[in-house]
Image (tube, helix red, strand yellow):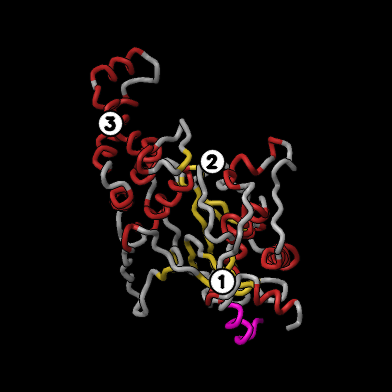
Amino acid sequence: MIDEETRARVLRQPQYSVSQLRAYCRCPKSYELQYLADPRYPTHGMGAVVWFGTMMQSLIQKAYYDHPLYEALLDAWQQECPTIFEALQDWYRLDIECRQSGKANTNARRAWLQEHPRYQELSEQITAYQHAALGKWDWKERFPLTAYFRWASAFAQRVPRERALLPGAVLVEGIPLFGPDGALAPLAERAGGKKNYRLLHGVCGEQNEVHVVGVPDEFAVDSDGVAWICDNKVTASMLTAAQCGEDLQLAKYVVLLLQNHWIEPGQPVRVGHKYLQEEDAVYVWGDTSRYEDLVLPQLHEQFSALKAARRFPRMRGIQPSAFSPCKSCGVAYACLTTPTRYRSGQGGQDLFAEDDALAAGE
């Protein structure tokens, strides 16, 4: 157990996340440039699937507030892509007709395209918007903006609501679904269409010395008292149940939910991912049977090592090309840069000042 004095002291210190931990493990230099340098170096060329994942999570979140899935889809996309929203809807209606006209590269499909030039015009209009408004993302040829809108629309129209949403959910993006009276609490919209979430804060590390933050996409408790912790995914590759049981992101959620009294000590817990596909929501659940002997010790060890790090060497040139993290690094353009200063921590102190003073016994 963590005493309240220790908890209060640690929570005043700079915070760490699994995203930071992953960046550090891939390449310490990348972590330094993204999170420590002042000013930070923005990431370039990140996969557009990250953007799409945020869109799908916005859809799911809105659906918990009694929005039909398709209505939630329209709200999310209109908010994110207002100037091209009507064109996307018109394109999707024509796209359904196009796919029903015949297989690609058949005479039937070619005839339909000749009879409906508006389909190509809308595609070009949407592509221009993609380049202008969403150009910072790396768009794959097979998955332009139109393909993601098709995916999201098919999901919202074909997947039953009870399949898309986690039964017994009480917390979505860190925000309680219900008020003290048990009634569904309204979701306050954030200015500028920003993601609506509330971070959970907790203490981690081998010496309870690391301030960690995070928020599960969805958290539920069923009628048997079992807690279910879920993150939503739009990737084609799926973890196995065993891999979910060893995933440090999900383990960190367990730690945070315990410390914030959403889970009770000894309460049975399942952790997993929900994979949002065009026509289904596929759940993969793992258990916590390896937490005490493997997962939690590794979680604490990794965060302690991250906080203690003072050297940030490059991984450039170490791994063979096939395994190099440089290919997908969003700050590879600044790899040879040496930051002249680090950002300040919370309260304005130097990011490493307190830790170094404690290590020196001051």
Name the residue carrying label 3: 122
Most prominent secondary structure in the magenta stretch?
helix
User: Decide: marks 1, 3 in contact (CB < 8 A)?
Assistant: no
Residue 113 as seen in the image, left or right of residue 350: left
Residue 59's x, y, as percent?
Answer: 37, 53
Q: Which amino acid does label 3 sit on?
A: Leu
Residue 299 as seen in the image, left or right of residue 230: right
Tell me the crowding category of disc 1: few under 14, some 14 to 19, or many 20 or more residues within 10 angstroms, Cα based.
some
Q: What residue type is labelled 1?
A: Gly
Residue 132's x, y, as percent?
Answer: 35, 40
At a point 55% along the width and 46% down the height, the residue shown is 330
Name the residue carrying label 1: 345
Locate the N terminus by quadrant.
bottom right
Whether the magenta-drawn stretch holds residue 233 is answered as no
Alpha-carbon span between mark 2 and mark 1: 38 Å
Q: Is residue 23 visible?
A: no
| Between discs 2 and 1, the one toward the N terminus | 2
Mark 2 or 1, which is nearer the eye?
A: 1
Question: In which image quadrant can residue 295 be found?
Answer: bottom right
Write the start and end of the magenta stretch as one range.
Answer: 1-11
At a point 45% along the width and 43% down the height, the residue shown is 137
Tell me the crowding category of disc 2: few under 14, some 14 to 19, or many 20 or more residues within 10 angstroms, Cα based.
few
Residue 8 as seen in the image, left or right of residue 151: right
Name the residue carrying label 2: 236
Locate the C terminus by quadrant.
bottom right
Residue 140's x, y, as percent?
Answer: 48, 34
In the rendered view, tell whether residue 233 sits above or below residue 14: above
Q: What residue type is labelled 2?
A: Ala
Alpha-carbon span between mark 2 and mark 3: 28 Å
Considering depth in this image, is 163 or 105 the residue closer to the camera? 105
At a point 50% along the width and 64% down the height, the residue shown is 215
Alpha-carbon span between mark 1 and mark 3: 48 Å
